[in-house]
Amino acid sequence: MNTTSRAILLAGAALCACCLPAHGQAFDVSKIHQITPPSSIMAQDAKKQYYTIPNFRIGGKYDLDAGPGSWRNGAAGGTTLESLGAPPLKVGYIAVGTPRRNAQGEITNALIINTFYSGDATWMYNTWYEGQPANAFSGGAIVGPGRTIDTERFYVVFLDAIGLWGEAKPSAGLGRKFPQYSYFDIVQANYQLLRDHLKVAQVEVATGVSMGATQSWVWGVMYSPGGFVKGIMPIGGTTASDGSDPVGQWTFRLGQAAIESDPVWRETGGNYYHLPEEKHPKKGLEFMWSALQLTGYTFPVRSGTPWSTLQKEVFYWDPKGDAGQTYINRVKNEDPVDYWYRNNAGFSYNINKDLKRIKARTLVVHVDTDMWLMVENARKAAEQVPGAFFAHFPDPGAHYGVFKAPNILRPTIQAFIEDRFTTSLPGIDGAAAAEGKPAAAAEAKPAGLAK
């Protein structure tokens, strides 16, 4: 064998080696959903559609000064899934409503709903779209004809996020070789879905709850300066989840430590996919959910709930009876590495210095009693955006009150969405006096709004 042939063979062997996921297994596309299903609500899975984005770079550094052209296919320094032997990035969505188009055939009335921390398009559709099984969780339907988000007026797109459900997730086959994504990657991939696949020319409003709200902030930073995003309405999100938000950082560091505390995780370093699924470190994931949920609701709610009920949410390494059963059941379709990546994406996230870039109409909505993401931080973020308004309300559901926000604050939120927002709307500080109503009536309202 001559030197050239040997070099070619060695290069080929090196390429094949880097295309092998964990433990040297070739990527098997037939097993993408073997560990976790494609949707969090499988009863709605048939409604989800996908768009493939070849050669999308995940995990790169986004230079906001350089502009969108520099990160059109993901940021410089990122890694494509193809380079790791996996299929190209796929992003999922559910679209409803009435598209209106310009002379070029592009959609001009899109409203996007970004998904939250553990959800996807099917979960938000199942909860917010009218006539669905989980409407009661949000206090009634929010999306549909004549609803707060009116599908006769808007083309509404429920979006997935890289990392959970769908097909772009560590548990699809790459495990811990999956690139560490950022919120910027999630938004940029969904931008390509909207712009290149759905032919959306502009987004009237980018919204979402919790991590979906956080993405709404990122949409504002990335795509409002050029006019693609006209309005943002983050509901219970954050502009920073690094150490500048001590409570949020501490909360999810505990969750991450819970995952890593599982004996199987510690033994394998999180590379456990060669093991039978019943051996995967799901006890750590149960522990994470139990740790998070202690403060998922207000302490009065927790304290007022019988221990026999609460014990189902309390983590035990060796549970007896129905102790811990809530999260034992929950994690059956979830994967620890998927959540490890999701947590890790937040630990270095901070766009506070970039809020001045936002040119979109902005309404920041937050729950006063949120025990994960403090209302004071949301208010401070709103103050950094010229012309932004801040709406807030208390809820015994604490962070989970975000799902009900569009119903609790319907007049204010609907007016903002439809771009007819005024300071005389119900819930705005001082509105009662402006309308000649008694002050007591204003105090009885479940929310206040301040510029």
Image (cartoon, rainbow, N blue to C red):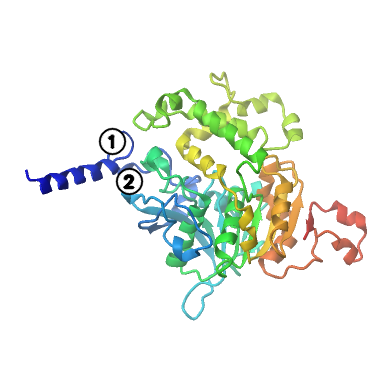
Mark 1 to mark 2: distance in Å?
12 Å
> Where's residue 113, x and y in %?
57, 57
Q: Residue at x 69, y 37 (%)?
A: 297
Q: Secondary structure at mark 2?
A: helix
252 on left or right of 401: left
The residue positioned 7% from the left and 45% from the top of the image is: 2
Name the side, left or right, on which 276 lies relative to 162: left
Mark 1 or mark 2, earlier in chain: 1
Residue highlighted by disc 2: 84
SS at circle 1: helix
Q: Residues within 10 Å of mark 2 (few under 14, many from 20)?
A: many
Which residue type does callout 1 highlight? Gly
Instruction: Single out the residue that lies furthest toward the bottom.
Output: 103
Are the residues flagged by discs 1 and 2 in contact, CB closer than 8 Å? no
Please indicate, yes or no, whether residue 316 appears anywhere in the rendered image.
Answer: yes
- Say if 104 sits above or below 225 in the image: below
Residue 84 locus on image (x, y percent): 32, 46
Residue to which mark 1 is pinned: 24
Relative to residue 265, is residue 225 drawn left or right? right
Amino acid type at mark 2: Leu
Picture mark count: 2
Query: How crowded is the residue under tag 1: few (<14 C-alpha within 10 Å), some, or many (20+)?
Result: few
Q: Quadrant of residue 108?
A: bottom right
Residue 44 spot, x, y in % from top left: 49, 50
Residue at left offset 80%, top offset 60%: 428
Residue 433 versus residue 377 in the image, above or below: below
Quadrant into which the C terminus falls: bottom right
Task: Give coordinates of residue 163: x percent, y percent.
Answer: 46, 46
Task: Residue at 74% x, 47% y: name it.
Answer: 376
